[in-house]
Image (cartoon, rainbow, N blue to C red):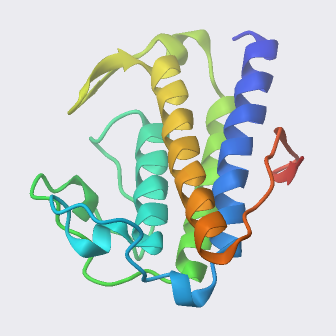
Amino acid sequence: MDTTFRTAIKSQFGAAIDMLDNALRACPDELWRVRLWNDESMPPAASEFWYVAYHTLFWLDLYLSGAVEGFTPPAPFTLDELDPAGLLPERVYTKDELQTYLDHSRQKLQSTIESLTDERANQHCKLAWGECSFAELLLDNMRHVQEHAAQLNLILGQQIASNPRWIAKTKGGRSSD
């Protein structure tokens, strides 16, 4: 596996995770359960800050695994996010629980990238939405994290007139802007 590519993915994917981390840390308690937008097709809790962060972390973790088969999120999280009926978790997760999940996922990203081989990058992944190589799944995953991090940062800017700064690349597991 090309070192330049591996370094770039680790740096940029890490920055996307850092942006999500900063949004989590910046969210005031009074915004944690507020409905962020109205979408009648979604249960109200699905548009709350905590759930958007959880949803992002769940799929980050799963996609770093490359397959649903054999995937188990760390406790206290469950596989409810995979339910085709769109069931939400049985309870609201705390900021500390999601921070721990983010740290777990950051470590998983680092080990995934460090052990990435050409064979693994080219491995075929089949998911409910389609098929792709593991390399493409990594890029799709990074875009998904950044999409929701940007969403949460926009909400922070609108609701509390403050949002975390842009992170150009990750630096040693913590951000650098």
Q: Quadrant of residue 20?
A: bottom right
Which one is in front, 66 or 41?
Answer: 41
Question: Which residue sits furthest left?
Answer: 85
Query: Observer-nearest residue: 26 or 140?
Result: 26
Residue under the point 57% across and 80% down: 95
Give the image location of residue 56, x and y in percent: 46, 54
* Residue 158 visible, this angle: yes
Percent x, y for residue 177? 89, 47
Work out whether residue 110 can be spotted: no
Q: Is residue 52 above or below residue 98?
A: above
Q: Name the residue furthest bottom.
A: 30
Q: Position of residue 8 (x, y in %)?
A: 77, 23
Q: Quadrant of residue 114?
A: top right
The residue at 48%/10% (across/down) is 122
Is residue 131 toward the left or the right of residue 172 in the image? Answer: left
Which is nearer the eye, 58 or 69?
58
Total numbered labels placed on residues in the image: 0
